[in-house]
Amino acid sequence: MFFKGHTLADGGAPLRSNELFRSLKALTKEPFLLLLIIGIFFLLFLFSLYPLIKVAMVSFERTDGTLGLDVYQQTLSNSYLRQGFYNSLLVASLTAIFGVAIGYLFAYTLNRADIPLKRFFRFVALMPVVFPPFIGAMSLIMLFGFNGMITAKIFGIRDFPVYGLWGLMMAQMICFFPVAFITLDGVISTISPTLEDAAFNLGASRWQAFRKVILPVSIPGIASTLLVLFIESLADFGNPLILAGSRFPVLSVQAYLEITGMYNLRTGAALAVWLLLPSILAFLAQKYWVSRKRYITLTGKPTTSVIKSVNRPVKWCLFSLCLLISLFILLIYATIIWGSFTQAWGMSNRFTLENFKYVFDVGWESIKDTLVIAFTSTPLSALLGMTIAFLIVRKRFPGKGAMDFLSLLSFAVPGTVIGIGYIFAFNTPPFLLTGTLAILVLNFVFRYIPVGIQSGIALLNQVDPAIEEAAFTLGANNRTVFSRVTLPLIIPAFFSALVFSFVRAMTAISAAIFLVSAKWNLMTVQILSQTDSGRLSEACAYSVILITIILFFMMLLKLLLRNKISLSNQNYGVR
Amino acid sequence: MGLVLENITKIFRSDGSDMRAVDHIALEIPSGALVTLLGPSGCGKTTTLRMIAGFELPTEGSVRLEGEDITFLPPNQRNISMVFQSYALFPHLSVEENVAFGLKIKHISRDTVRKETREMIDLVGLRGLEKRRPDQLSGGQQQRVALARSLVMKPKVLLFDEPLSNLDAKLRESMRLEIRRIQQETAITSVYVTHDQVEAMSISDLIVIMEKGKIMQKGSPFEVYIRPENAFVADFIGKVNFIEGVADKQDPESGIVVSSSLKKSFNCRNALVEKGRPARIVVRPEAFSLSNARNEELNSIAGTVLSYSFLGSHLEYIVKLPDGSVINALEYNLSERQLPRVGEEKRLFFSKENAWTIPG
Ligand SMILES: Nc1ncnc2c1ncn2[C@@H]1O[C@H](COP(=O)(O)OP(=O)(O)O)[C@@H](O)[C@H]1O
Ligand SMILES: [Mg+2]
């Protein structure tokens, strides 16, 4: 501003290269930090970016070794594949819109209407987070499918259109609307009710207050959530595999079938790229456009202002809608539990424990493998996430923007794409990893670091940086500062990252399905293959066991951390 | 020389707009001295301090400590401690653990750590509070912990960034004296940042006055008050009156400034300004006397009392001069033990010794 012209007069460009040199020179005085940064870049490149490059390379490479884009033309001219692209975008858009609508309905009702059963609604809305993403699809088939409990048994309908667009959308909405709810709940709960009071005082009706105050303020949150759901839905693999089949092809399933079914690597790679493009675009829009607009400070003092945003009829209307949706979600999950105790869902509904015995007999190895993989990858992922958050928020070094981008990129990359990338990238020396534990662990670690990074960044931004600077001036090096000061201060973020990536690792499917082997298998893959071969009751038993394990460890962590968490509730240097 | 800043400059770059926060600061700080960086908010004090600490890398220039170039060293390798405005205590550690933090890192014996920690806690007067957490302490106590935590490291340089600004006025005064006492006892080279000129005057060996990233003047508190080099410094340190005019006589020992608007010439202590160039006379409010005695040695101006305030020990006048400008004057010994009247004519005298010229 003030000195702008002055600086340029000194010779802008040479000065800048000199500055780069100076900051590199400063970095060489901290070899550990330098190595850490280089190491993280190397790992991010190798395990997040390189597999994607590999996918693109495979799609370019003709059988005679020359390069070309012809496979993209082929995929576009094939009507079946083109349909997949179109379907994927359609489902993703619809899921995003309806998912956000339901999420908003829940968030608004729970924050602005004085209704009973709020805790129950909140519980139901968050429940799907801990379930494998494709449970919805399984349950829909059990309820509305060919032998569906509701369609066939109650109404005698055998061809209810659960396979296809609407079924898939329904399953995805059940699975992804919690994401919308969590974000929008955060948005609406920070809008001070005094804002609406002010609008009422100015003579606005309730509807006007909603339209002119609440809605505009939540628009950035809505936009961002739309994009996130769009990405999640595009990437979804389990639900379309179960529900869509060949009648309603989507890209993620097509790519999987091309590669594992027909060994058509080039086409599979091209489809993966087609799948990747809209996801990346949505991610870029979310990160660089929408999220910039979100920092509106609206948090007034917490007021005990009586909630009067909605009148009685509207209130009960909202309540009924939420109740209906909640009951439906409960039905979905109850069906799974019920199914796990039936002899053969749809044919014989006799009570039995055989399914569990079967799972422990046949699937014991996969249970063990799943746990080993989750327990190895989760702490690594959380720790790496916190480390990157620390570097990004607190350190200045060349290439920081790139690190930020690279580490969040895996959020935008559909699991199918990254899974395909891993088998292409790590099937030859020096990175011969296919079939090993390592490939699964690495995949999970790098897929779920964004979770840790984001919660770490959020918490670090609230901690006075002077606290860490004080430690530096007392002679602590980066390692000591991180382990003795930063980590204790952001321990809540660390554990929430831990819980979240544990759940994700336990329920992952889309990338993992490419990476499992005879030696290392996953429960989710077992569930899918049981479902595929029509053994729904066994699939349910697997699911129930999986969910029980997840809940067990979540409870355990909560118990163990009771002291730590209460510690974190103290003021704790948080501004 | 203890700490030397060689033309350090810091430019913050953000999307195309550059901010020159510190602009070629050159400074030598003798070992054992307490130097204050004084200036209005945003003038680059904190940035300068952070370059000394190692949190910011100078865009140009270098920092030397006892002859060694430390420009590129990270903060933890500099042996420089810092006391922060927000205290920045480790919230998850007790008072004792906060103070012992740096010592423990040095891998010295437990007994030594315990002994030195205890001594330091005694020195800053916190005995009995060792087991408390920072959030169980008052602001003043927290500041003592922060001080103890830094001092116990026996740093080569101790940095303070507005350490007292979060305390109430009374506590600020006593803490100020205490910081000075401890600093002199330990003889640690210190750089102290403040925007409060009273604080700076009372605590410093050397004051560096900054504005827009540049040094406007450096000197002892006495020098910067008595011999300001420019209007900014004169105005920033204490209250001041400026009488505008043109320099007349050229003589290093004394000068004459002619004011055309007041139709008078004044004798001054110095002649910094070339003959014929605009000059300003700096007269402090307490340098005036408002008696009626005629004294040829003295400069005098007539004016009318616009208003006054009686403040017990003294009277504070606002006097309007014939050219419309306004003078602020203090009178300590009320000559007739009675208050003046508003609108009354007064004659303001000031001696040649109290008239200091700077470029106009
Ligand atoms: N990290 C930064 N990025 C951009 N500008 C900064 C940064 N730190 C300080 N500044 C700017 O540099 C100037 C000097 O700031 P500072 O050194 O904090 O001043 P002071 O401590 O004297 O109040 C201010 O205009 C401030 O806005
Ligand atoms: Mg400052």
Image (spheres, rainbow, N blue to C red):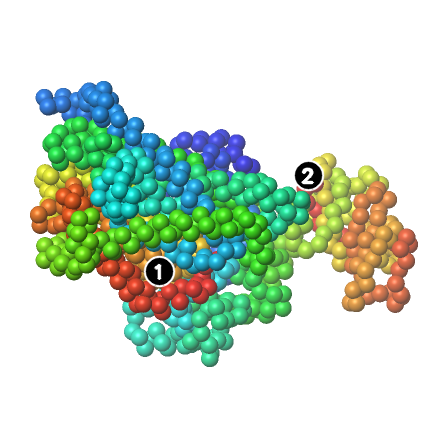
Q: Residues within 10 Å of mark 1 (few under 14, many from 20)?
A: some
Amino acid of disc 1: Ile
Is residue A11 visible in this depiction of the protein?
yes
Q: In front here: A536 or B275?
A: A536
Q: Residues within 10 Å of mark 2 (few under 14, many from 20)?
A: some
Residue wearing tag 2: B274
Percent position (x, y) of residue A86? 30, 28
Percent position (x, y) of residue A427? 11, 39
Vertical placement of residue A68 versus A93, above or below? above
Is residue B156 visible in this depiction of the protein?
no
Residue drawn at the location 33% of the way across and 41% of the way down: A170
- Image quadrant occupied by the C terminus of chain B: top right
Vertical placement of residue A574 versus A321, above or below? below
**Quarter of the image where one finds residue A58:** top left
Mark whose residue sits in front, 2 or 1: 1
Q: In front here: A393 or A525?
A: A525
Residue wearing tag 1: A491
- Image quadrant occupied by the N terminus of chain B: bottom left
Residue drawn at the location 63% of the way across and 60% of the way down: B198
Q: Is residue A533 left or right of residue A306?
A: left
